[in-house]
Image: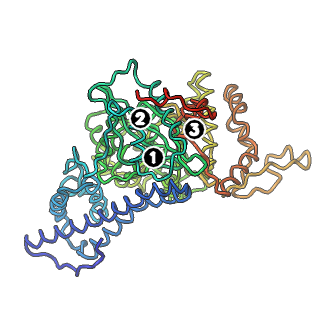
Amino acid sequence: MNDQSFPAVPTPRSSAELSRLAYEIAKATLEGFDRHYRIFREISREARARFELADWKAVHLAHADRIAFYDRRVVETAERVTRDFDAERLPEELWSQIKLHYVGLLTDHKQPELAETFFNSVSCKLLHRSYFHNDYIFVRPAVATELLDSDAPAYRSYYPRKEGLRRVMRRILEESGLTLPFPNLKRDLACVCRAARAGLPKPFHAEANHQIQVASSLFYRNKRCYLIGKVVNGETEMPFAIPIVHDGQGGLTLDALLLEARRIAPLFAFSRAYLMADMEVPSAFVDFLASMLPRKPKAELYTALGLQKHGKTLFFRDFLHHLKHSSDDFILAPGIRGLVMIVFTLPSYPYVFKVIRDRISPTKDVSREIVKEKYMLVKRHDRIGRMADTLEYADVAFPRERFTQALIDELKREAPSLVDDDGDALVIRHLYIERRMKPLNMFLDEATDDQIVGAVIDYGRAIKELASVNIFPGDMLFKNFGVTRGGRVVFYDYDEIVYMTECNFRRIPEPRTPEDEMSAEPWYPVGQNDIFPEEFAPFLLSGNTVKRTFLEHHSDLLDVAFWNGTKERIREGFIEDVFPYSPHNRFAVRFPDMFDGAPVRQSDSAPL
C-alpha cells in the first residue's frame, strides 16, 4: 500500500470534486485490500516450505498470524481514509459514489468478492449502522465470480484412460511443487491403485471423458498436506483426497486415499484449523471444492480456506435469505441455562446465537473482555477437530417480531448494554454465531446404550486430543460439549479454557486425621491453577453405562500422571499426530502386507 499521505481535503463544492474524491477513496480502499491479499498469499504460499522442513511450530504461528492480518489492514485503511481524506467531515451519502467507483475498479480483479467484503469492513468502521444497506455497502454482491479463473487454472486434468492410473498419479505428484523425495513411491502408488479399485463403483468402465481433476494447489494444515481432486467418468464424479505426510526418514509418503464426500468433508469441518493453499482466484477453488462437496455451503468453504471474513459475509447473506423465507421465532436454546452466555436459536436454522451476559455469575471468575479473549484464543489455536469455530458480529439487527417475549425479556434483563430496541428491530451490539449441536448431556439422556458407549468413548478422545494441543477445557461437564450431525463430540464452552502448560495438576494429599477426611473444605492449600483429576469422576460419571464405559476406556484421565505426562511432552515441543480421518484408512493399517518389506506386485501398480 502507498503510505504517502495526501493533504487534508477541503469540503468539496462541486459534483466533479465529489466524484474525484469518491474515486480516490475507492482507490485507497482497494489498495488496502490488495496489500492484505498479497500478504495473505505470501504466508499461504510459504506453507509448502514449512511443511517440508517439518517446522510445526512455525506452522502454528503462521496460522495465528494469518488470522490477524485482515483486521490490521482494515484498521490501516480506515485510518488512511480518515487521515488523508478528512473522512469525518465528508457527507456520509458520498459512500454511495465511493461504492460505484469501487465496483468499477474491480473490473478484471482476481478476488472481487473478497475485495467487496473488505470494502464493507472499512465502511462499517466509518459509517453509522443506519447506512449498512446496499446503497453504501455490499449487502448483495456486485461483481460475479462465475467462470472467473487465473492464467494457471484452479485445477488440472489428467487422463488415466490414455496413460494409466499409476503413471498419471506419478505425474500429478511431480507437478505438485513438492521438492522432498518419495522414497517408497512405487509402494505408495500401488496402495493408491489397490484402494481405488476397492472404492470405485464396479464394474468400472472408462468412458470417453474419463479424467482425474486435481486442484492446482496442495492444501496444508498441521503435519499434513492434501492432494484434492475428483475422478470424472461419464456422468459420475467421485471426489478424493490423498494426505501426504513425512515418513520419518527425510522423505514423504502417501498416507491414505479418501473417497466419497462424507470422508472428505471433515477436512473442511468448522472444528478444525483453517487450511492454507496458494489461490490467485479463490472463487475458482471454492467452486471446484463445492462441486465435490455439495452439502458444504460456500460460506464454510471460504472460511475453511482462511478467508473467514468473506465466509462471514456469505453466511449473513444466507441468513437474511433464510429469514425472508421462514416464519418461526427465535427462542432460547434448549438445554441448561448458561452462566456466561445467553444462547438463542431459530429452530429452522442450524446455528445458535450467543450473547455475553452483563452480569456473569460470581461462580465464574471471568469478565466480558476475558470471554472475548478466550474465543479469539480458540480461533487462532489449532482446534484439532474438537473445538467449534465461531463467527463474531457487531451491530446485528434482528426483526423484533420474530423474537419470543421470553427471549426479549432475557436479553434486556441479562445483557441490556448489548441490546438496542429500535421498535421494529432488536440490534445486538456483539454476538457469536456457532453451528448448532446437540448438547452431549441431552444426547446421553436420549441415547441407546450403544450410542452412549460411542459418545463417551469419543468424549474422552476429545479431551485427550485437546490436551495434546495444549488446551485444558476447564469445565468438562457434558453440557459444554456437543454432538455434531456426524456423531463427533466437540467442545464449545470457552470461558474457562486455559493452556495445559499453565495448569498445575496435583494429587489430593492423604488426610492427616479423621477430621480431615470428613471435612467439607480441603485441608490442603489450593492454588488458582491447581487441578485435581481425581475430582473429575464424581462430577462426570453418572449412570452405569457412562461410568463403566469411561472407566474402561479413559480411566487415565482421572490420574495426574496422564496430565503431567502430556504437559511435559508439550513443553518438550512434541506435536501429537491427530488424524482428521479414521486411522483404519491409512495405507500402513489397511494394507500391512505392503509394508512388510515384500516386493510390490505388478498387478498392484498396473493401470485401472
Is 117 located above or below residue 242 in the figure? below
Q: Decide: marks 2, 3 in contact (CB < 8 A)?
A: no
Where in the figure is residue 455, as x and y percent of width and height? Answer: 59, 30
How far apart, in angstroms, are the residues tagged by discs 2 and 3? 36 Å
Q: Amino acid at mark 2?
A: Phe
Instruction: Single out the residue that lies furthest toward the top.
Output: 203
Residue at 52 percent of width and 53 percent of height: 381
In front of the other: 52 or 35: 52
Mark 1 nearby-residue class (10 Å; few <14, some 14–19, many ≥20): many
Q: Is residue 402 visible?
A: yes
**Where residue 85 sits in the image (x, y, percent)?**
23, 74
Q: Secondary structure at mark 3?
A: helix
Instruction: Name the image quarter holding the N terminus.
Output: bottom left
Reading the image, the residue beneath label 2 is 240
**Horizontal arrangement in the rendering, residue 257 relative to residue 569 (left or right):** left
CA gap, disc 2 and disc 1:
36 Å
Residue identified by numbered label 1: 354
Eyeballing the image, is 557 above or below 91?
above
Q: Whole-Å distance between the Cαs marked 3 and 1?
A: 15 Å
